[in-house]
Amino acid sequence: MRSVSGTLGIALVTALALGGCGGAKDKQPELMHLRSTTSGPDEFGILPTKPLAMPDSLTELPAPTPGGANITDPTPQADAVAALGGNPERVTAKGRSAGDGGLLSHADRFGVDGKIRDQLAAEDLEWRRKHDGRLLERLFNINVYLKAYRPMSLDQKAELDRWRQLGLRTPAAPPSGKAQKSLP
């Protein structure tokens, strides 16, 4: 009797353990486990609108565009251009500079695959599922993002050395170790 209940207990624990492993194909893999410990709002999720202002003349107001942009809507691209000293009026509604037409047409001269984002998203999801971390890393919410994407990362020092060995200028990079040692 005791061995039958022991066997049933082991079978029940095994069934529960295996049942807990199911459904992993539908779950999005989490490589970064970032959670706020506070119950307050997400300060980065709040996007303030521009302040309301009365124009000098009501005839200057643009015609209403249902579903379109509003003059109080945030324009982060244009605001960033203005903050850096540029002309925010040169940024189009798509967030591109009006002068970038030639560059964009040259970049897509061989054609553009309209489904590239979907393809890359599917490939990345598959990559994240394969590199979702070990069992204990998942149980204890250990970040495995950097470890998962390490094969895709660029070794900056090796790449900088490769460029320098080719005799190419690297003005934005720090000087080489030999050059730094020769400094006073």
Image: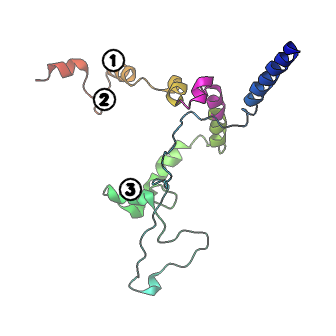
Residue found farthest to the front: 1
Q: Quote the CA–CA distance across marks 2 and 1.
A: 11 Å
Asked which secondary structure carries label 2, the reply is: loop
- Amino acid under label 3? Ala
Q: Amino acid at mark 2?
A: Thr
| Residue 66 placement, left or right of 9 | left
Vertical relation: 73 (above or below) 15: below
Q: Are the two marked residues, 2 and 1, in contact with CB atoms closer than 8 angstroms? A: no
**Residue plotted at (89% across, 15% down):** 1
Residue 92 higher or lower than 107, as above or below: below
Residue 130 drawn in magenta: yes
| Foreground pick, 157 / 167 | 157
- State the residue in front, 179 or 112: 179
Residue 182: image quadrant is top left
From which residue to which does the magenta span run? 125-142
What amino acid type is highlighted by mark number 1?
A: Gln
Q: Position of residue 48 (x, y in %)?
A: 45, 64
Residue in the picture at 85% in, 13% down: 3
User: As rendered, which of 4 and 56 lies closer to the eye?
Assistant: 4
Q: Quadrant of residue 20?
A: top right
Tell me residue 154's x, y (percent).
Answer: 45, 26
In the figure, 113 relative to 127: above or below?
Answer: below
Q: CA distance from mark 3 to mark 2?
A: 28 Å
> Mark 3 or 1 closer to N-term?
3
Tell me the residue that label 1 is attached to: 165
Residue at image mark 3: 80
Q: Which mark is residue 170?
A: 2
- Mark 1 or mark 2, which is nearer the start of the sequence? 1
Q: CA distance from mark 3 to mark 1?
A: 37 Å
